[in-house]
Image (cartoon, coloured by chain):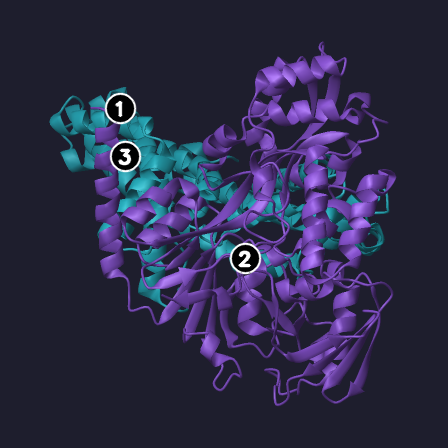
Amino acid sequence: MLLFLLKRIGAGLVLLVAATAGTFFLAHLAISDPTAALLGSTATPEQQAALALKLGLDRPVLVQFLDWAGHAVRGDLGLSWRSFQPVSEQILQRVPVTLSIVTFALLLAALFGTLFGVLAGLNPGGVFDRVIQAVTVVLFALPGFWLSLVLVLWFAVRLQWFPAIGYVSPADSMTGWLRSITRPSVSLALGAIVMVAEQLRNQVMTVSRLDYIRTLKSRGLPKSRIRMHVLRNAAPTAITVLAVMFTGLLSGAVVVEAIFSMPGLGQLTQSSAQMGDIPMLLGITAATVFFLVLVYILLDIVLGWVNPKVRIR
Amino acid sequence: MTTRKASRLMGAFAALLLGLAGAAAAAEDDLRIGNLLDVTSWDPALADIGFDGPYLSAVYDPLVIIDETGKVLPALATDWQFSEDRLTLTMNLRQGVRFSDGTPFNADAAVANLEHLKAGARSSEAYHNVKSVRKVDDDTVEIALSARDDSMLYLMGLGRSYMISPDVIAKGTAAAAPVGSGPYTLEKALPGAEYDFTRVPGHWDAATYPYDRVAVFPILDPTARHNAMLSGQVNVSYGDPVNNQQAEAAGWNVSQSPAGWVGLMFLDHEGKRLPPLKDVRVRQALNHAFNGPAILKAVSHEAGKPANQVFAVGRPGHVAALDNRYPYDFEKAKALMAEAGFADGFDVTMPMAPLFQPWQPVTEQTLGLLNIRVQWDNMQTPDYQVNAPKYPMFIAFIAMDGDPIANLARQVTMPQWYNLEPEYAKFPEIAALVEKAQTLTGDDQIKAVEALNTKLTEEAWWSVWYQAANVYHAQPGIRVTGVPGMMFPTLRFIKRG
């Protein structure tokens, strides 16, 4: 297991280097002279040149990347070109917002996806299964941004149960925090719930038809124990889907943060890209890849714990 | 269902929602602004005038302010006077003002600030002609100019004379947090989301600011801004003209102010890079060929005014007769092209970035109908500002100023990102009119600017399709007055009413 983990961490590091290098070189290719956007249209060429010198833009691009990478491995992600504040500080301010939305959405997806998937899978063709199938089709067909807008109009504008925009830190108000993240999380989770439910339903149906389940039934085991066996063997699929979904939810958060005006990583990515703030973009990429690698390693550990068959020696 | 019925139903639904939102809105002791962008910097030398006004005007006092017509009025500078040759400006300063760190505002502080602003990448635009600044006595400063500059005071009033504690300038921490003498102090900041300000007791200009608390929310997405208005979470917002009808149906106050002109920028009137542009008939054809009012309706949702000039409608320097100097007349455009010897058109390469894509199809189609073949060089928006002037012509959205001399400088005479090497001096008639406008004073100066404006429009110096406007939505009881030159006005322009 230790060797497996080390291999996973090694692969994660390779991914981290590849992603940050890709971001760095693509950003430099797309933004030829960031000083214009950073200083505004009134800056003189001399002021632009002075800023370029200050930012080290006069050096070869490869040297700039190696310099950044050298500092990054020591935990120094540099200064934002826009605010001249540490990148890591600004990312740490934003991470709780995005993680709050994504984690809450993931919890909702796990809870309701599992519930609906299992209920539908254990009674295929039943009323509940048919309802779930119909809802799945509808929710798959509806665009996420449209659902988000409907949620805003109904729950924030019409009923005023939730704020239309903004984020409240749990340090300021726990209920305020829950109110601020509920709608964005629900917007994100709706698609995820039906995806988990559908996957789990199919897996439960497949496992239920396997020989060993039939054998257990013929031995007269109680239904509850048989279901436990079914669920334990169907669980890895749902867990894998949830972990993969984490990536999708992170991407979805960019749109949701814009619709609900939440100061998360998505919004920071958007504004940094517009301003040509390359250190900030690199920091965000590094943080995102770090989280993804962490989630996938945790996924492997959880899968091994849930189902010994998938443990890797 | 007919379109009319459908729109009535939608209007009724919107009005219902808006009514509910309005009913739920709290008593308006608080001003809650849905702005478009986050504050660029707390350092006034690095801040942008565009959308930074609400943030900076909350925490800083300027030396001078402007009113909505562009007239310069006192603030921390109580009065001023130019020397006879207009090369020295003496300003008397308000006494008894202190910054939030306890440092007094005096001539030393003003000198430190003016030198800081002159060196700033963004603020220096107001101080190009400043040679030196010196303290005369504790409440008087003197600004020496290397050349007469009639737009300096206007630009200072627009947002280029905010005073901050000299201590933070000395320490180099001006961008970290605001330390000013403004009507409010920053109580809480959640960058990218919310800035809360509370009133400073006993501020010298407290009567101008009727609200005890101010919150500014940067909300990039127009739908999110509108939803925040609908829910009552904000009571003033940078409006999306698409929602004007709903806003008016709900009784919101909807106001507009000139923002910038939209059209084609010509940078090669001598025809060195694109020979056809040398011929005024070609440039005039490119004015007649575009249906400005239709583009204004389709792209800018009627937020603005049709115009063929670069001086803001209703502001000094504007000539009403020029607004329809080039009515849409495609046959005339074709005839002018033929007359100039370009019936078969010509090839042109133009830059393109996402910000200008809404106008790309109409440009390509219109030019195509004149047999002008366009090749687009795609780039990111930040690169557009760097690269666009390298092309002989490009699609432009250029901000306009309310002050005629400042507008003349930025549109014609001063190097700008969109006009790195102004060409006016190579055209004697235009150069003479420019000189006259820059030499005269008072009403004579305005008349000279109008004459210059007429000449430039006749010469089809640009192809101006329309003047786009900034739109502001405010809950009943609040009124926003837009100011040309500011995308979002400073707090003094948001009143009860």
Q: Nearer the viewer, residue B125 or A69?
A: B125
Does the rendering let one see residue B200? Answer: yes
- Where B258 falls versus B356 (above or below)? below
Instruction: Name the tint of chain A in the rendering.
Output: cyan
Q: Which mark is residue A231?
A: 3
SS under mark 3: helix
Q: Nearer the viewer, residue B440 or A94?
A: B440
Q: In this rendering, do the residues under marks 1 and 2 share a single chain?
A: no
- Where B246 falls versus B281 (above or below)? below
Which residue was labeled with disc 2?
Answer: B483
Q: In this rendering, do the residues under marks 1 and 3 share a single chain?
A: yes
- Residue B298, position as x, y percentages in the image: 46, 30
Q: Closer to the camera: disc 1 or disc 3?
A: 3
Cα distance in 3D space between marks 1 and 2: 78 Å
Q: Residue drawn 72% across and 60% down?
A: B151
Q: Which mark is residue B337?
A: none
Q: Residues within 10 Å of mark 1 (few under 14, many from 20)?
A: some
Cα distance in 3D space between marks 2 and 3: 66 Å
SS under mark 1: helix
Q: Chain of mark 3?
A: A
Q: Residue drawn 21% across and 22% down?
A: A214
Which residue was labeled with disc 1?
Answer: A212
Identity, as a three-letter code, of the amino acid under mark 3: Leu
Cα distance in 3D space between marks 1 and 3: 13 Å
Q: Residue furthest top?
A: B344
Identity, as a three-letter code, of the amino acid under mark 2: Val
Mark with earlier residue (1, 3) = 1
